[in-house]
Image (cartoon, coloured by chain):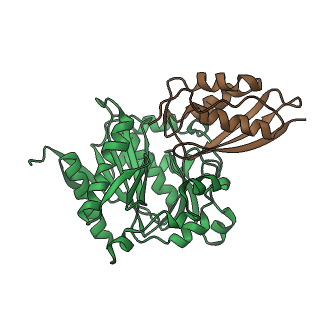
Chain colours: A brown, B green
Amino acid sequence: MALSGAAVERAAKGVIRARVVVDANARRILEVQLSGDFFVYPEDAVWRLEEALRGAPIDQVPARVTAALEGVRLVGCVPSDFIKAILEAAKGAGATAEIPGKADGGEHT
Amino acid sequence: MVAVRELRVLLFEEPENPYMNLAFEEALARARGAGLVPDTLRIWRNAKAVVIGYFQVASEEVDLERAGRERVAVARRFTGGGAVYHDLGNVNYSVAVGAEGLRDPVEHAYFHLVGGLVNALKLLGLDARVENVNDVAVGGRKVSGTAASFRLGSCFVHGTLLVDADLEAMSRLLKPPAEKLKSKGVSDVKHRVVNISQLLGRKISYREVVEAIVQGFERLLNAEAYFDLPSREELEATRLLYERKYSRGEWNLQRAPHSAFDVESELKGVLRA
């Protein structure tokens, strides 16, 4: 049985919504959908990020997000905003991993 | 100052068909990217619509039941950013310029090109400034929101301008997340935005707004405006985009990427420079 959760994270500009489905043991991400009023260039990096998270163990979420957003221009948000939204949503689905602080990485225009 | 170049201006609009209006936006960005048209400013309106950003899910942003009841269309644009309410009291502008030679297209769009609208508001007597990345505000209240894209070969930016829009309708139809309003210290979307007619204390005609926007961009780009009609290629690309993407529920209501719509190969044929 899969479990799902949702979370909203506020970035410097805009909000990031994450909907996450985790496996029955709440250890692995099955699906992620990211939505909101953020700006990411190139735009389709959002779908590549979701693909990169499919099947990811929860504790690998920060590394996978950081890698998937390498070279992607974020305007008004940073990679840790996405990480926080995804981990909060996963937590809502019963999974837990340490949520990092906002200090890490990302261009912030 | 001597004008060193020309600025093409389009007043082409389909107010009763927001899907077509938004298909034209993508067609314009593509046509400029393909070098088929020169740098272009478009000014246009929708009669009644909520327009959502590329990454948004319609049901998360819009009271869809109410929109249906009030016959308000929900339409997606190809740029990111948030949901906005459009009626004839909201004037939209779009600018498509060449991206070649730009050191930083993001900076160019959000910090330079938006200056055309700031100029327009100053011409109308308003002390406007860019705030919070993509808002244009007067006295701390937002009158315009901006979004940009660079994926179609051009540097494209478009924005709204609240002239005399129905802010009650905006408030009824949009569902801003509690987190966002809390951070702005206001209880309702209508309290952080304002119509420029209210700021000026008088009615302002569409013609006056158009003239101010055109002059604002003429000043910014040191260019002389001329009015034009859409090109055959722009209209043909618009028709294709409308049929295959912008008129479809999968595009407007869900959150599907451009690649989910089978239109690229035919568009390439239409937009071959």
Give left or right: position of B222 versus A59: left
Give left or right: position of A69 versus B135: right
- The residue drawn where x is 33% and y is 60% is B11
Whether residue B270 is visible, yes or no, is: yes
Residue found farthest to the left? B2
- The residue drawn where x is 18% and y is 47% is B222
Residue found farthest to the right? A1
Residue found farthest to the bottom? B202
- The residue drawn where x is 47% and y is 53% is B22
Where is residue B119? Give x, y as percent. 26, 56
Residue A58, picture quadrant: top right
Where is residue A63? Give x, y as percent. 65, 22
Whether residue A56 is visible, yes or no, is: no
Where is residue A42? Give x, y as percent. 49, 32
**On screen, residue A74 above or below B95:** above
- The residue drawn where x is 48% and y is 56% is B20
Instruction: Work out whether residue B71 or residue B108 is closer to the camera in this orientation and state it.
Output: B108
Instruction: Work out whether residue B236 or residue B15 is closer to the camera in this orientation and state it.
Output: B15
